[in-house]
Image: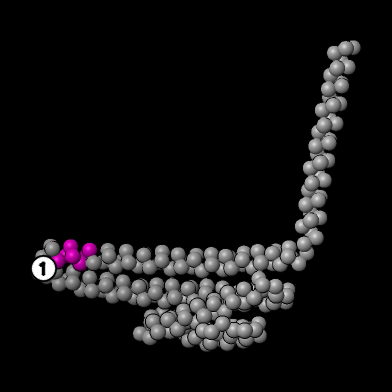
Amino acid sequence: MDPPTSWDSLRKQARRLEAQLDDQMHLYRKLVSKNVGSGNENDLETEIDQLLKQLQLVNSQMQAWVSSGGSEIFSHTLTRHQEILHDLNQEFMRLRSSLRANKEHASLLEDFREFDRARLDLEEGGSYEQASLLKERAAISRGTGQMDTVISQAQETLGTLVFQRSTFGGINSKLSNVSSRLPTVNSILSAIKKKKSMDTIILSLVASVCTFLILIYWLTK
C-alpha cells in the first residue's frame, strides 16, 4: 500500500478499511454462531487478519502525521481510530477463540464416541495394547484442546499490549509537541527548580547557623 500524501487520504483509507472489516466481521459472527466451522472459516480469518494489518499500518502513518506537528483535532481523530482498531482486534480474537473451542469440543465428542465404540469392540474381542492406544489418543486430544485455549489467551493479551503501546506512543508525541511549541515553559520550569534548590540551600544554612549559635549559647551560659 503506497503511503498517502495527506491527512484526508489517511482518514479515507482508515474508514474504508473499517467498513470492510465491519462487513467481514458480520460474516464471521454468523459463522461462529453455527458453533462449528463450515470449512471456509480459514479464508475469512485470513482476509480479516490482512485487513487488520492494513488498518494498523494506516494508524501508524496517522500517528507519524500527528507526531510531526498535527493539530489537536488530528490527535483526537487518531485516538478514535485506534480505539476502533483495538475493539476489532479484541472481537476477532474472541470470536476466533470461541470458534476453535467449539470445533475442539466437537472433535473431542467425536473422539469419545469413537473410543466408546472401539471399547465395546475390544470388550467383545480385542487386545490390551489396542485399548492403551485408544486411551492415549483421548488424552492427547484433551491436551491439544487445553493448548489451544492457552494460545488464544496469549493472543488476546498480545493485542491488549499492542494497543497500550500505541496509546502510550500517542501520549509521548503529544508531550513532545507541547514542549516544542512552548519552549518558554521548559525554561520557566527550570528556573523554578533552580530557585527552589537555592531556597532549600539557604534555609539549610540558616538553620545550621542558628543551631550552632544556640549550642554555643547554652555551652557558655
Q: What amino acid type is highlighted by mark number 1?
A: Gly
Q: Is residue 167 visible?
A: yes
Residue 83 percent location from the top left of the image = 61, 74
**Colour scheme in the image?**
one colour
Instruction: Answer with left or right where residue 212 lies relative to residue 24.
Output: right
Residue 210 percent location from the top left of the image = 86, 26
Comparing 179 with 81, the one in front is 179
User: Does the magenta portion include 217?
Assistant: no
Q: Secondary structure at mark 1?
A: loop
Count of all numbered marks drawn on residues in the image: 1
Specify few, some or many for label 1: CA neighbours under 10 Å numbering under 14, 14-19, or 20 or more: few
Q: Residue at x 66, y 71 (%)?
A: 67
Residue 45 percent location from the top left of the image = 43, 81
For the C terminus, the quadrant is: top right
Comparing 152 with 187, the one in front is 187
Q: Is residue 88 visible?
A: no
Q: Residue at x 39, y 72 (%)?
A: 101
Residue 134 percent location from the top left of the image = 20, 67
Residue at image mark 1: 126
State whether the magenta stretch is mostly helix, strand or loop. helix
* The residue stretch that appears in magenta: 130-136
Q: Residue at x 81, y 41 (%)?
A: 198
Comparing 87 with 102, the one in front is 87
Name above or below for residue 2 compared with residue 206. Answer: below
Name above or below for residue 212 compared with residue 72. Answer: above
Comparing 21 with 96, the one in front is 21
Q: Residue at x 51, y 84 (%)?
A: 1
